[in-house]
């Protein structure tokens, strides 16, 4: 039986050709010609004052907080229902992540929860475009402006998505992207920071290269310039190999997203009448990048049993994403009941641009059977 993986990167001959060009250039490391070209293309695409290519989205989040002078003891409100990268970044600078609950229908950060969490120690908010769906930025920007807070958009999953006609990645003064293997534009691992203020980009670019800037640029200077380390920096550069791949992927975003849209439409159409699960909700004012397709199972369904049945048929699946406040490393005393419930009941089913319609139909058939045979005694069904 043909296996259907949960995720699959859409990398092919065009990307291989771009890598070959980098090999021929003699500069595979970071902040070289390909990296600079990628940054220019990102800045143009998103209308940013500057764009900085980095090793991953987590690095971009960390560097953003450093550029904003977030200090130990400061509080940063973060979306709870997400991969925990925002909370990790806050901890990296010694600040305190304060977890905001999410909307039950979209899984995105709830502006009402954010407003209730603001204290005199709050310095900013990191919103997340949850698995590819943008958050409510009109309300979030209003809260940030009212209280004098920074607002960062974690658009890791949302390349290709829109909010009120504007691209995800351009919805806050600072945005962070991911080019991980399951994203809409991928080079395996990678990321970028987009900033309205060019001074933020300059700070991030310097810190991402040990605080000394581009060795490639220094190598073109006549004489023997010796860089000075004036501050502690990090090795967060994106290699030119990866940058070249992303440049190709960015030109393919519309094509790849159209394929994901087709699969999402198949899933949502065929599962709309299934009483034992709920399909994702996309508000009318935004579009989804479909990094993941997560169904929410009825409380009476044994999720583990469903996953076991699907995997036995070669169909990939996962838990969805995390309720960050429940993770042991954060030891949070907060409660985010909506996030916790979505975390318990979410199930990610195969979603990627290489998925065929007939495969999606097979997933739906198997999922229906697995769900209906995995109802617990609460509903009187078989375990």
Image (cartoon, grey):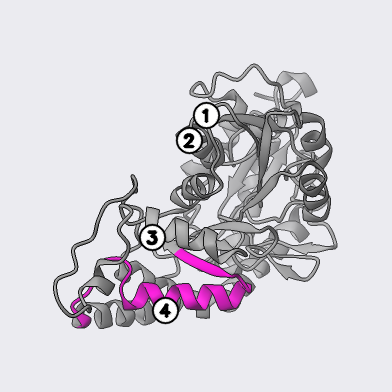
Residue 361: give its label: none
Any part of residue 96 in sight: yes
Residue 29 on the magenta span: yes
Residue 93 is labelled as 2
Q: Earlier in the sequence, mark 4 or mark 2?
A: 4
- Which type of secondary structure does the marked residue at label 2 adopt? loop
Q: Nearer the viewer, mark 4 or mark 3?
A: 4
Find residue 37 and name its label. Answer: 4
Q: Could you tell me how far apart the alpha carbons at marks 2 and 3 are, in whole angstroms?
A: 27 Å
Q: Which label lies toward us, 1 or 3?
A: 1
Residue 191 appears in the rendering: no
Q: Is residue 81 left or right of residue 227?
A: right
Q: Residue at x 56, y 63 (%)?
A: 194
Tell me where the magenta segment starts and ends, as one range.
25-52
Earlier along the polypeptide chain: callout 2 or callout 1? 1
Residue drawn at x 73%, y 45% is 108
**For the residues bearing labels 4 and 3, Cβ distance under 8 angstroms:** no
What is the CA distance from the residue labelled 1 to the residue labelled 4? 36 Å
Which sits in the foreground, 245 or 270? 245
Q: Categorize mark 1 by other alpha carbons within 10 Å: few (<14), some (14-19), many (20+).
A: few
- Disc with the residue nearer the chain's start (2 vs 3): 2
User: Magenta stretch: residue 184 in it?
Assistant: no
* Horizontal and vertical percent position of residue 18: 33, 80
**2 vs 3, front mark:** 2
In the picture, measured across the screen, residue 310 lies left or right of residue 191, that is right
Q: CA distance from mark 4 to mark 2?
A: 30 Å
Q: Is residue 234 left or right of residue 134?
A: left
Which residue is the site of mark 1?
Answer: 72
Residue located beneath label 3 in the image: 188
Front disc: 4 or 2: 2
Which residue is nearer to you in this view: 311 or 133? 133
């Amino acid at each position: 039986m043909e296996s259907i993986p949960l995720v699959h990167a859409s990398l092919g001959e065009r990307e291989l050709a771009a890598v070959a060009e980098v090999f021929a250039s003699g500069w595979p490391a970071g902040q070289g010609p390909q990296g600079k070209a990628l940054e220019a293309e990102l800045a143009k695409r998103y209308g940013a004052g500057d764009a900085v290519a980095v090793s991953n989205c987590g690095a971009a989040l960390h560097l953003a907080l450093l550029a904003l002078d977030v200090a130990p003891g400061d509080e940063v409100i973060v979306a709870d229902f997400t991969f925990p990268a925002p909370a990790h970044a806050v901890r990296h600078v010694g600040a305190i992540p304060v977890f905001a609950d999410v909307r039950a229908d979209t899984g995105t950060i709830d502006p009402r929860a954010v407003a209730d969490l603001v204290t005199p120690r709050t310095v900013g908010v990191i919103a997340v475009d949850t698995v590819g769906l943008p958050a409510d930025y009109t309300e979030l920007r209003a809260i940030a402006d009212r209280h004098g807070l920074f607002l960062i958009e974690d658009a890791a999953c949302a390349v290709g998505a829109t909010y009120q006609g504007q691209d995800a990645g351009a919805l806050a003064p600072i945005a962070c992207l991911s080019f991980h293997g399951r994203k809409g534009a991928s080079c395996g691992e990678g990321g970028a920071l987009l900033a309205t203020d060019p001074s933020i980009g300059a700070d991030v670019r310097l810190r991402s290269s040990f605080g000394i800037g581009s060795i490639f640029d220094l190598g073109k200077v006549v004489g023997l310039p010796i860089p000075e380390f004036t501050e502690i920096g990090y090795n967060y550069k994106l290699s030119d190999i990866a940058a070249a791949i992303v440049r190709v992927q960015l030109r393919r975003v519309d094509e790849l997203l159209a394929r994901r849209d087709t699969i999402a439409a198949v899933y949502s159409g065929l599962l709309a009448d299934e009483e034992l699960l709920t399909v994702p909700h996309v508000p009318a004012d935004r579009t989804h990048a479909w990094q993941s397709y997560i169904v929410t199972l009825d409380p009476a369904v044994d999720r583990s049993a469903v996953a076991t049945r699907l995997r036995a048929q070669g169909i990939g699946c996962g838990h969805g994403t995390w309720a960050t406040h429940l993770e042991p490393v954060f030891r949070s005393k907060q409660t985010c009941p909506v996030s916790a419930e979505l975390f318990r009941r979410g199930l990610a089913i195969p979603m990627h641009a290489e998925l065929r319609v007939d495969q999606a139909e097979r997933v739906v058939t198997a999922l229906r059977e697995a769900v209906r045979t995995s109802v617990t005694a609460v509903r009187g069904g078989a375990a």
